[in-house]
Image: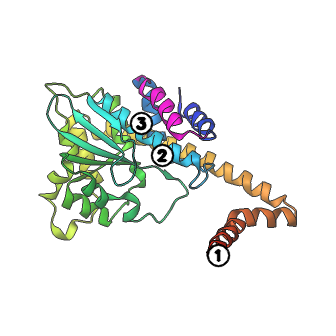
Amino acid sequence: MDYQELRSIIKKESKKEDFKNSSDYLETIIYNLDIKNLIPIITEIGSIPEDVGHDSSEEKLYAKVSDIVLAKCFRELGLKASVNKERSNCADVTAKSCFHNYSLVGDAKSFRLSRTAKNQKDFKVKSMAHWKYDNDYAVLVCPYYQYPKSKSQIYGQALDDNITLFTWEYLSILLDNNVCEDDQINISSFWNISRRLSGKTEHINRNRCFLDDQDEIIKLFLNISTAQFNIFLKSYKRNIITRGENEIKYWENIKTEINSYTKEQAIEELLKTLKLNEKINTIKKYINSLKDG
């Protein structure tokens, strides 16, 4: 299975009414993937396709699948991991070391390539500090190139609360290099990166992007050179560029379709987009309930 096949299943399952059954079905599929098929999906899952509707059933199922993929990554790294069934006021994923007596919570993030002006609330770093509870670590996983490039409060927050700002690309690199925890190998140092960096970061620089520092820690753990590490990052960039070009084609096709609309069709589509009828009906329902009372 590749990413496009997974997307097709998500789209098909999102049209069904039983979200739980669809989630369980996709969980079975993803957990049964071998690592060869999993790795290409890891770096794709962080970009929500542009044709997925905002707040749609498909978007909700896609988010759940990203949680499942994250749990699967933890499993491939040798941890016992599962997806939380309830999404409110808790992290998406929990994991526990089978060998070294530590536990963590994880939160999976995916963004549209068209999404700009992301702020600290989009990453929920402070929420992760609360969701950690009695677990040892909290790990946020986001696309590498979607993190702020220079300064952001999320970096200071991560240092203050020891929240690991990990990436889908890091996970891919680790699995591509056959990293798996056992009684001799302890990978908890990855989940403690922010604490390590906090001790050596001056207060004036606490909101500075520290991804470069994380890169060095991962290269050292894997014993790979900067050139080797950059080969991985360049391949991810190429994939993103290809995805981006395809997403642009999607919107260009939408533009062509809209340009062919009659005036009546354009007005009808605008009304649908603004959901005016739904808003009118909601207000009517509310005031009618007051009249009946």
Task: Please name which of the two marks, 3 or 1, marks the residue nearer to the observer.
Answer: 1
Q: Position of residue 279 (x, y in %)?
A: 66, 69
Q: Amino acid at mark 3?
A: Val
Give the residue type that dot 2 points to: Ala
Res. 287 mark: 1
Direction from residue 37 to residue 264 in the image, left or right: right
In the rendering, which numbered label is found on residue 31? none
SS under mark 3: helix
In the picture of the structure, the residue carrying the numbered disc 3 is 69
Looking at the image, do the residues carrying marks 3 and 1 touch, with CB atoms under 8 Å apart?
no
Q: Residue at coordinates 55% horizontally, 57% vertically from top-left?
A: 114
| Residue 153 lies in the magenta-colored region | no
**Which of the two discs, 1 and 2, sits closer to the camera?**
1
Whole-angstrom CA distance, mark 1 to mark 2, is 36 Å
Q: Position of residue 193 (x, y in %)?
A: 20, 48
Q: Which residue occupies the foreground of this view, 83 or 44? A: 83
